[in-house]
Amino acid sequence: MIIKGRIIKEGEAEGEALVSTKPIAFLGGINPKTGIVIERGHPLEGESVSGKILVFPHGKGSTVGTYIIYRMKKLNTAPAAIINEYCEPIVAVGAIIANIPCVDMVDISKIKSGDFVRVKGDTIYVNE
Amino acid sequence: MLNGEMGEGVQKAMEIIVALGKIYNAKELIKVESAHISGVSYKNLGDEGLEFLEEFASMGVKTIVEATLNPAGMDMESWEELGFSREFAEKQTRIVKAYERMGVKATCTCTPYLIGNKPKFGQHIAWSESSAIIYANSILGARTNRESGISALASAITGRTAKYGLHLDENRLADYIVKVKCDVKGVSDFGALGYLIGKIVGDKVPYITGIKIADLDELKALGASMAASGAVGLFHMENITPETKIKKMIKDHAEEIEIENLKEAYETLNYDIREIDVVSIGCPHASIEEIRKVAYMIKGRKVKSQLWITTSRRIYDEAKRQGLLEIINEAGGKVIRDTCIVVAPIEELGFKTLATNSAKMATLSPSHSKVKVRFGSLEDCIKAALSGVWNDN
């Protein structure tokens, strides 16, 4: 399956999809040292986002989340790429300063956790 | 800029501006005349933010428009005598230095409009710091969205912002008409009113009627609390704010609401405490008039609790020149530069209870600094400072 989105941060990456139906807060929601989701009750609680193609509706929470994304990149715990339904500024700016490919305007219900996903510019290849 | 011909840092800054333009469906980029940048306190930024700012500065980026800086987490000079730790001070200093290397003026104030970064009516600017944004939009009639620290920095470096939101005429019209039916007097009342309006209108634009007179300190307090309890970026006040004097600033089907009294705000923001560790005046940063009022009230007396008046370096120097600093210091009060109780790590300083005339501070401090708060007039706050306890009248 090939899906077209909108480029927030141009780039290329591939990996296993990790899909959340709920928004993600990077500050307080993920431990930047491990890349593991720590928000209690979150659908991805306990899962590692490191190296994954992280798929979620949009970001939420503190704007400091932007810097957490940057920190995760430095610590090699960041996702390989981010796919959103609609990207908001916390995630957008975080992806840009951390050089993480980011695409939005995507119907994320078409992607399942465990799918092999490749992101190239505005194009998303799912199990292709 | 987007292709990297001006270096990686400028490219990143431009990517940020373009991405925000996409997210908010802007048709074009416009030039900005000024930037004001939040995201300075080490308490909020942490090592992540510090690391990013130092690397960004190392890429050689430079601001190309007037750019001022929000408060830091401490007085950049007297941190040691105020009890800040060396580690905090060291990291805080590195953050401010990184901004300075990029060409940002280390003003360390949330009231840049009181010290020279004062945009003109109709100018497009890129400001962060919610209280400064709402002041610039509403009272000065300049135009800015509610930028984050990093997007404001990107605008300072590129001289551009995306044209959407409050840059556009149609989005500056009010969604709500707020009819004020009670007396509103002094900074704390205006703050209380702002608290109530912000709760109701959220991120929409209110048009306030029923206020005949308001000074700049009162308007500063009104906007600050509206932007803290809600996410208001612009308000209008009939015959007082500049855009209302030029044309009708209300949408056709604006919803009407009435405010009968301010009781709910005072009740919600007040905790049941008596002993006061610190009385805090200057959120947003105190003007010279506010410092003068405090000086007259405590002249020749002694405070029992701590009294912190937070302001900018520039206003501090002015207060010193006018002899106000000496009066306050003699009474045992402190005028503190570059920071405020919201962004300073006051838990580390051992404060557990606080009194303030700022509704913004009363809104934020319980969650942000884990203190219990008394909120009331300047007179009540100074009484509490002199006696060490809060007395309900």
Image: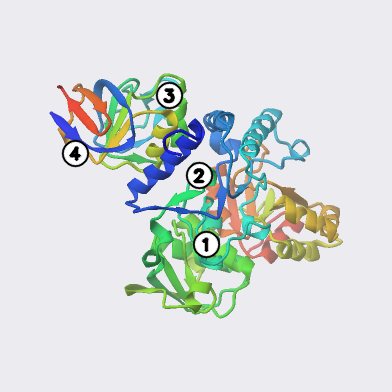
Task: Identify the secondary structure beneath mark 3.
Answer: helix
Q: Amino acid at mark 4?
A: Asp
Q: Which residue in the protein does label 1 denote?
A: B123
The quadrant the C terminus of chain B occupies is: bottom right
Lower position in the chain sequence, tag 2 or tag 1? 1
Q: How many angstroms separate mark 3 from mark 2 (CA)?
A: 25 Å
Pointer 3 chain: A
Q: How many angstroms separate mark 4 from mark 2 (CA)?
A: 33 Å
Q: How many angstroms separate mark 1 from mark 3 (CA)?
A: 38 Å
Q: Which residue in the protein does label 2 denote?
A: B158
Pointer 1 chain: B
Are the residues flagged by discs 2 and 1 in contact, CB closer than 8 Å?
no
Pointer 2 chain: B
Residue A78 lies, in percent from the top left, at: 38, 24
Return the mark for residue A107: 4
Q: What residue is at 75 percent from the left and 66 percent from the top?
A: B293
Q: How many angstroms separate mark 3 from mark 4 (CA)?
A: 26 Å
Residue B260 lies, in percent from the top left, at: 46, 75
Q: Amino acid at mark 3?
A: Lys
* Mark 1 burial class by Cα count in 10 Å: few <14, some 14-19, many 20+: some
